[in-house]
Amino acid sequence: MCSTSGAVRAATGTRLLLTVLLAASLAPSPTDAQQGGLPKGVVEIKPRQGETATARAGGPDGVFTWKGALRCRGDDEAIVGARVRRGRVLDYLQIVCAAVSCDGGDCRWDRYLSTASVGDPNGGNAPVLMLCRQNEVVAGFRARVLGLFNLQYVEDISIQCAPIAGPPVKSVAPVAAKGRSWRTTTGHLDRPQVEGICPAGGASAVAAFAGRYATGANVAQALALLCGSSRSACPDGTHTDFSPLGPELYNPMKKRPANAPCPECCKPCVTLQGSMGVSGRTDREVANLPIGRYNCHFYTLSYMNYVAPPIQAGRPPRRFQKLPGNIPFVGSTEECLEDTDFDAYGFRKVQAGTVDPNALEAGDVVAVFSAAVVTQSCRNSHSGVVIGVDPLVIRQKPNPEACVTDFTWDEFTTFYQARGRSHRVNAWRLEQ
């Protein structure tokens, strides 16, 4: 039985001396790297689309024997705990998964199963199970590490459990920001040195690295959490699942639980290159722009620039400026469509407040406005272009984070809260 406990009994001197000796004794050699089958030095695990990685505990250098992402098997399952074995360092780590089901807003799991693992299942002391409550999933970790500079080993960990806020999608359950608590192997964790927290979605996987310890034992040397997004329900090629269009708002309007799956929120991105028809010229133009550089009114004004007569006193739409690091600046440069813009481009209001979708024509512009705003400036909160009437199709850019997509009239009015007294819709048509 391989265990790291013997290394501690044999060690003398101070803790600092131990870490120095470990660093010297574990310097990777070509032979070790070949035997391990993995390259020396930093070994990274790439998150899937929609995932983000927390800080990593352990490593980054060492004699790595394995790396991978520990994941649950089913899309309805989530990570609810961890089973560990410890000696001087973390010998073994195994994730614990459970299928989550929701009844209205009450989400919980009943039975759990220990699944994927890293390290030596026979190493260290007796196994210890850290388990979340049945209405929680894992959403964070803390770790204490042993080592010096770039050669570090996870000594001990604790997991953070967060209340489940909705059904899991692709093994990611949305979680609450409040009511979180910690589970440890010994009741507490002294001097945690690394912390990784998933803010909105539970942990979708554990990025794990197996390495060789001083005794030659195979241990769970390094780890990080891969965090899922609460918006990860949408498959690749779609990107409309955002507030206020997300399930938190959309489902109650549809008289469904707030956290119910929302397939209507995942609308396909329009293929802009080569687009034809009413908005074809606009589509082809914005196809070359980064998604995060323009909003719905930029798209609408671009369309109006193309269809309005050249003599009309229009204006070029404004893209977002960018801060260092390619971060969009949403502020004074955010495009705002005003009623006076419609007048300048030669559009007249053909329906006001309450719109009959059967009376709309291809080429019309529909704009959601707030009834509480008295001034014309920035009164319109959203706009889109009617590109078809049988069936009715409205093309727009939902927000700066989303791709251009098509909505039905029902989706348009529901997503943008345009069915009540506070938000209404005007329809505008180009005068011929």
Image (cartoon, rainbow, N blue to C red):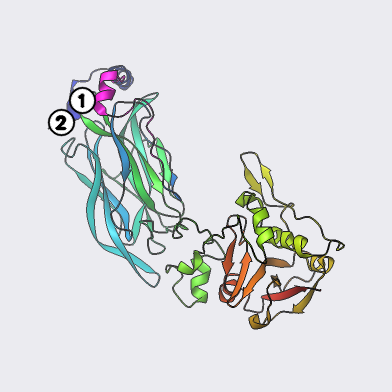
Picture quarter containing residue 141? top left
Which amino acid, by three-letter code, is at mark 2?
A: Cys
Q: Secondary structure at mark 1?
A: loop
Along the line of sight, which residue is nearer the eye, 387 or 92?
A: 387
- Residue 275, given in percent of the width and then of the height, sits at 61, 60
**Residue reaching furthest to the left:** 1
Q: Is residue 213 visible?
A: no
Along the line of sight, which residue is nearer the eye, 216 or 387?
A: 387
Label 2: few (<14), some (14–19) or many (≥20) C-alpha neighbours in 10 Å: some
Above or below, 128 relative to 77: above
Label 1: few (<14), some (14–19) or many (≥20) C-alpha neighbours in 10 Å: few
Along the line of sight, which residue is nearer the eye, 239 or 157?
A: 239
Q: Give the CA separation, mark 2 to mark 1.
A: 8 Å
Q: Earlier in the sequence, mark 2 or mark 1?
A: 2
Q: Which residue is mark 1?
A: 216
Picture quarter containing residue 152? top left
Left or right of 344 on screen, residue 95:
left
Residue in the image at 64% along x and 80% along y: 357
What stretch of residues is rendered in magenta?
26-46
| Prevailing secondary structure class for the magenta stretch in the rendered image | loop
Left or right of 365 on screen, residue 150:
left
- Would you say the residues marked 2 and 1 are in contact, meaning their CB atoms lie under 8 Å apart? yes
- Residue 398, given in percent of the width and then of the height, sits at 61, 62
- Let me know if residue 55 is in the magenta part: no
- Let me know if residue 32 is in the magenta part: yes
Numbered circle sitting on residue 288: none
Along the line of sight, which residue is nearer the eye, 257 or 351?
A: 351
Q: Which residue is mark 2?
A: 2
Which amino acid, by three-letter code, is at mark 1?
A: Gly
